[in-house]
Image: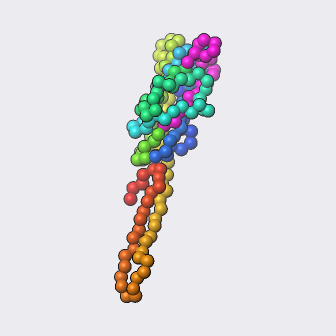
Amino acid sequence: VITVGKTAVGDVVPGANATFAVTVTNVGTPDARAITLTDPLPVGMTFVGVDAAGTSTGWDCSATAAGATTVDCELTPSLQGSAVVPAANVTTVTFIVAVPDDVTETILNTATATWANCAGTCETSGSWTDDPTITADPSVVKGAPVSVLAGEGFDYTFTVTNNGPSQVGV
């Protein structure tokens, strides 16, 4: 039997890249073999790539192209000739996604793992949910004419800019 856990590594900021880690834990006594992982991303998010530093040896996500909306990975055969998660062990795949700049609602994401050698149900899922961290960088510039004659009126101009990465409402 395996379990799946999904977490965000840091904040999920609209308009920026986010990193997610999916852990697959073998909580049973036999080794889990031929594990595949499928993670349909939340609406608008797209796959950027695998974070090799946070990924255990053996995960292959090369079938997932940059820009894809579903991440597909498999635990590939090791040097010993089998793709195995031994009993009581954990393996992790970590990947980066682009988050659209207009996300404001709670994000829910579920990853599902399947494996070959089991009795009964050979599929399990793990979910992550959180609110995005809206990060805006507003600036205001006030302008006025260079010179004004005494007694005459003039207009100020204000330019408001959001340097992002997240959208903000007014």
Question: Which residues are drawn in magenta?
Answer: 76-97
**Color theme of the render:** rainbow
Residue 94: quadrant of the picture: top right
- Residue 103 spot, x, y in % from top left: 42, 45
Residue at horizontal 48 percent and vertical 32 percent from the top: 127
In this image, 82 relative to 146: left or right? Answer: right
Q: Is residue 113 left or right of residue 90?
A: left
Q: Position of residue 90 (x, y in %)?
A: 61, 24
Front in this rendered view, residue 152 or 18: 152
Q: Nearer the viewer, residue 37 or 64?
A: 64
Q: Is residue 89 above or below residue 148?
A: above
Residue 145 appears at what percent x and percent y? 41, 76
What is the quadrant of residue 7 in the picture?
Answer: top right
Q: Outermost residue, bottom direction?
A: 151
Residue at position x 51%, y 13% in the image: 116
| Up-down relation of residue 42 to residue 87 (above or below) | below
Q: Residue at 49% across / 45% down in the picture?
A: 16
Quadrant of the snapshot with the C terminus:
bottom left
How many marks do you count on the picture? 0
Q: Is 83 placed above or below 153 here?
A: above
Question: In which quadrant is the N terminus drawn?
Answer: top right
Q: Position of residue 106 (x, y in %)?
A: 44, 43
Question: Front-most of 62 and 22?
Answer: 62
For residue 81, say whether it is visible.
Answer: yes
Outermost residue, front direction?
146
Residue at screen point 43% across, 38% down? 45
Q: Is residue 1 visible?
A: no
**Magenta run includes residue 77:** yes
Q: Is residue 150 magenta?
A: no
